[in-house]
Image (cartoon, rainbow, N blue to C red):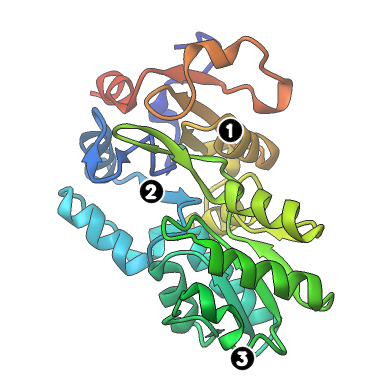
Amino acid sequence: MDSKTKPLDTFNTFLFDGDGVIYKENSPLPGGIEFIKLLQKREKKVFVLTNNSTKTRDEFKAKFSALGLNLPLESILSSAYLTAHYLSTEKSSARVYVIGEEGLKKEFVNFGVEVINRNEETNEEDIFSLNMDNIDYVVTGMDRGLNYVKISRAVNILMSYKETKFIATNADFTFPTVHGLIPGGGAMIKILEELSGRKVEKIIGKPNSEMFEIAMELSQTNKEQMIMFGDRLETDILGANLAGIKTCLVLSGVTSMKDLVDLKDDNSPDLIMNSLQDAYDSFL
Ligand SMILES: [Mg+2]
C-alpha cells in the first residue's frame, strides 16, 4: 500500500465496480464478498457503481443475494438504471430503439420509457417490418444477441432521422468473463458510429460524473471520506479521480501490471491491489 495514503479505515463510504472487482460473471472474485460484508458489519456505507447495462437493479440485487450479500436496492447504481432515469426525465413517454439486453429494456419499461423493440423479431427478410418513425433515442448497451437486423435498424434510424438522439449506457470496450475478454458496450457504440457516420451524443456511465454524484448525495459523505475500487482505468479510476474521490485499482479484472507503464495523471490510482482480498486482509 502507498505509504502516503491513509489506511482504509479512515474512509466511511466505499464504492465498488462490479465486473472484474466483486465478480466475473457469476463467480465471485477473491475477497470481494467477504470484504463488503466486513464493511457492512463495521457500519460503513457501500455502493456498487456498475457500467454493466444487462440487468435491472432488482436483478443485480438478486445476483448479490445469490453470492451471499444483502445490498439495499438504493445502493446499486447501474448504467441501465441511470439511463432509464435520464430518459424519463428528459422526455415524457420517450420512444426508444435499444441495442441491449433484456435487463436494459426491462429497466426502461419500469421508468415508463417506450421500447419499440421490446420483443423484437429479427428475421433478415423483415428488417423494415418494425415501425421506425418518431423515435426519440437510439440507446446502446452490451448486447450479446447483437445481429445484422438489429444493426441495420439502429443504423437506418440514425441515418434517416437526425433529430433522433444517440445515447449510450456505457463505453466499456471489453467485458471480463471467466474465459477472457469479450466486446462490451463501447463496441456497440463503435459499430453504430462507423456505419451511421453519427457520433454518440451522451454516455451515461463512468467516467462521467452522474454515478459518483448520486453516490455522494445518497451517502451524505464528504468526498474525502470516499474511496472507489475499480478494475478499469478509463472509467472507474478516471471517473473517481475527476470527482475528487480516492481510488484503488484492483488487478482482478481488465487491467494488468503491463497496462500500468503509461499511466496519465488523471487515470492514476492512489492504491493498487491484486484483488479485494488485499483490502480485506488489510482491514481485519
Ligand atoms: Mg469492471
* Residue shown at 58% from the left, 36% from the top: 224
- Labels 3 and 1: the sequence-earlier one: 3
Which amino acid does the dot numbered 3 rest on? Answer: Ser
Q: CA distance from mark 3 to mark 1?
A: 35 Å
Where is residue 283? Give x, y as percent: 29, 24
Mark 1 in CB contact with mark 2 (< 8 angstroms): no
Q: Which residue carries the number 1 mark?
A: 237
Q: Amino acid at mark 2?
A: Lys
Question: Dot 2, how many residues are within 10 Å of its Cα: few (below 14), some (14-19), or many (20+)?
Answer: many
Q: Is residue 29 above or below residue 186?
A: above
The residue at 68%/64% (across/down) is 167
Quarter occupied by the N terminus: top left
Q: Determine the CA span between mark 1 and mark 2.
A: 19 Å
Q: Position of residue 216 (x, y in %)?
A: 56, 53
Residue behind mark 2: 45
For disc 3, the marked residue is: 93
Q: Residue furthest front?
A: 125
- Residue 69: percent from left, percent from top: 20, 50
Q: The C terminus appears in which quarter of the rendering?
A: top left
Crowding around mark 3 (Cα neighbors within 10 Å: few <14, some 14 to 19, many 20+) is: some
Residue 88 visible to an observer of this rendering: no
Q: Is 120 above or below relative to 1?
A: below
The foreground one among 211 and 194 is: 194
Q: Residue at point 37% right, 18% down?
A: 274
